[in-house]
């Protein structure tokens, strides 16, 4: 099925969809800079403050798969609009929040809206652009928004908090959300979901959503509760049991939430494994390097955002054109492996950055390599995860790859932060000063992050096909001209 709209309108629709995604990506980092101001204003303790972040992550991670499947059943545009509406209203509630409970609850609703938008936006973009060259370019734009949005969030969060107040990091979403909603109505035709007529697998939805939420809760609280504590191990054990129950359910129901046959597609399996490992490495880069700049080199929040600017500019130049040409020339496998190796090299450069480092000598080279790596690799990862999927499963595949990134990033960051904290503690006990101890801990995190990126490159280079085969059409699929906002079988 395909969007039967003219070329210029499709590219405008891409801009609108990416603007909606940018809101979601920004919100994962823009809050971090404002946390001290939020704590002072609403009286959060150090323990309770983490729920401003964790409340969002819990619902975001838990509902990605379900959101993608609902898009397949009831229409991707309909779910995208619903997610934008929910996210925008929750942003308003966050912005006017005058109590801890109100802010945390509104953040949880934001996470739910963000999960729906993230889960269906990728399938909408894939279905808008079915010609391989145009699809590669469109995915490059999407990749740039996803990869560079976090850095923009740090910059914007510092600016809004310093100039206005923390309330505006949420209120700024209102005009954007309204504009995205209106433009989406005008640019993307309505239609039924590609899996219209199938029943929602309620038992599967409940078990996998509960499993993901328990896993996210265990991960984000692992450092505080202890990774070997009864709470953490119990939650992870319960998540594993629920996930096993989900797989049993999926093998027996007539219309499964996640057809297990998807994992027989090598591209999906490999792309999701690579996505988990790469997200862990990239989260290590973004968050640990931001801590290095702030706590070791004493950068202010705005300075941290500016330090990431070279990487963002490089990612932008690749994502907005160069990456598409590389994919069309060399396929998917080689650019993915090359990009991940460059990212690994950048992380290893950060692993040697001294406590008295200078930007040009010790920060910029790693930033540039990571910018090249992310700009080259992100597009192939997304194409690998989506290109062989049938239209009726595109929303689910989108939810799967977003879940892989989210879970990989959360788990990787939690583990790498624990390793960094352990190394810092041992150096401090050995008599090192605070800055040296912190820097030593960050070095360990960067080294492990580099190892993960290199391992992901090896897996992608050896197991991924060079090019993707087009998927089979859905059985009984209608003519392309009769469908929702567009999706025909991808042929990239």
Image (spheres, helix red, strand yellow):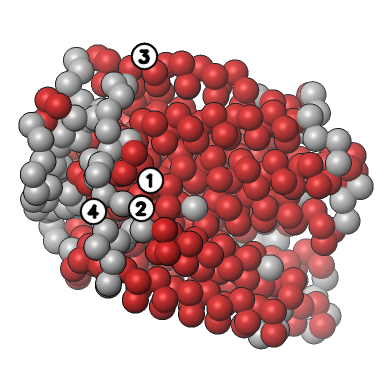
Q: Which residue is mark 3?
A: 186
The vertical placement of 436 against 19, above or below, is: below
* Distance (Cα) linking label 4 and label 3: 30 Å
The x and y percentages for residue 95 are 74, 30
Query: Are circles 1 and 2 on residues that touch, CB within 8 Å?
Result: yes
Which type of secondary structure does the marked residue at label 4 adopt?
helix
**Mark in the foreground, 1 or 2:** 2
Q: Which residue is mark 1?
A: 70
Closer-to-camera residue (229/350): 229
Determine which of the numbered discs, if any, sits on residue 384 in the image: 4
* Distance (Cα) linking label 4 and label 2: 27 Å
Can residue 79 be seen here? The reply is yes
**Mark in the foreground, 4 or 3:** 3
Closer-to-camera residue (32/243): 243
Decide which of tag 2 and tag 3 comes sooner along the chain: 3
**Mark in the foreground, 2 or 3:** 2
The x and y percentages for residue 486 are 22, 30
* Distance (Cα) linking label 4 and label 1: 22 Å
* Distance (Cα) linking label 2 and label 3: 29 Å
Q: Which residue is mark 2?
A: 200
């Amino acid at each position: 099925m395909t969007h039967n709209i003219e070329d210029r309108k499709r590219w405008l629709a891409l801009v609108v969809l990416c603007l909606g995604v940018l809101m979601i990506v920004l919100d994962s980092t823009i809050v971090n800079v404002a946390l001290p101001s939020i704590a002072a204003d609403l009286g959060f303790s150090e323990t309770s403050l983490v729920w401003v972040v964790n409340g969002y992550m819990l619902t975001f991670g838990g509902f990605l798969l379900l959101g993608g499947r609902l898009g397949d059943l009831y229409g991707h545009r309909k779910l995208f609009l619903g997610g934008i509406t929910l996210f925008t209203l929750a942003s308003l509630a966050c912005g006017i929040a005058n109590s801890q409970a109100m802010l945390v609850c509104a953040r949880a609703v934001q996470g739910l809206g963000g999960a729906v938008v993230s889960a269906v936006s990728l399938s909408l973009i894939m279905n808008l652009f079915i010609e391989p060259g145009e699809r590669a370019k469109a995915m490059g734009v999407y990749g740039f928004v996803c990869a560079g949005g976090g850095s923009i969030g740090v910059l914007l969060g510092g600016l809004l908090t310093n100039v206005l107040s923390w309330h505006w990091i949420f209120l700024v979403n209102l005009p954007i959300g309204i504009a995205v909603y209106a433009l989406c109505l005008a640019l993307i035709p309505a239609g039924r979901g590609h899996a219209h007529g199938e029943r929602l697998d309620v038992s599967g939805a409940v078990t996998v959503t509960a499993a993901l939420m328990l896993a996210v809760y265990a991960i984000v609280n692992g450092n505080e509760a202890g990774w070997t504590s009864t709470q953490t191990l119990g939650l992870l054990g319960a998540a594993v049991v629920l996930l096993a129950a989900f797989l049993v359910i999926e093998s027996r129901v007539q219309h499964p939430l996640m057809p297990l046959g998807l994992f027989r597609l090598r591209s999906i399996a490999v792309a999701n494994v690579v996505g988990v490992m790469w997200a862990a490495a990239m989260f290590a880069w973004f968050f640990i390097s931001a801590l290095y700049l702030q706590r070791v080199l004493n950068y202010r929040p705005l300075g941290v955002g500016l330090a990431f600017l070279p990487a963002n500019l490089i990612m932008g130049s690749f994502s907005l054109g160069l990456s598409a040409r590389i994919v069309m020339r060399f396929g998917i496998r080689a650019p993915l492996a090359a990009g991940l190796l460059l990212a690994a090299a950048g992380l290893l450069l950060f692993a040697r950055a001294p406590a008295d480092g200078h930007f040009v000598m010790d920060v910029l080279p790693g930033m540039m390599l990571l910018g090249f790596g992310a700009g080259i690799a992100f597009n192939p990862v997304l194409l690998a995860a989506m290109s062989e999927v049938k239209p009726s499963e595109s929303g689910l595949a989108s939810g799967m790859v977003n879940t892989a990134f989210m879970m990989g990033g959360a788990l990787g960051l939690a583990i790498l932060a624990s390793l960094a904290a352990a190394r810092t503690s041992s150096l401090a006990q050995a008599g090192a000063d605070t800055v040296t101890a912190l820097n030593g801990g960050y070095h360990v995190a960067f080294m492990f992050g580099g190892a993960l990126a290199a391992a992901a490159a090896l897996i992608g280079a050896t197991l991924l096909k060079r090019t993707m085969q087009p998927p089979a059409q859905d059985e009984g699929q209608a003519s392309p001209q009769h469908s929702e906002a567009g999706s025909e079988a991808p042929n990239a």
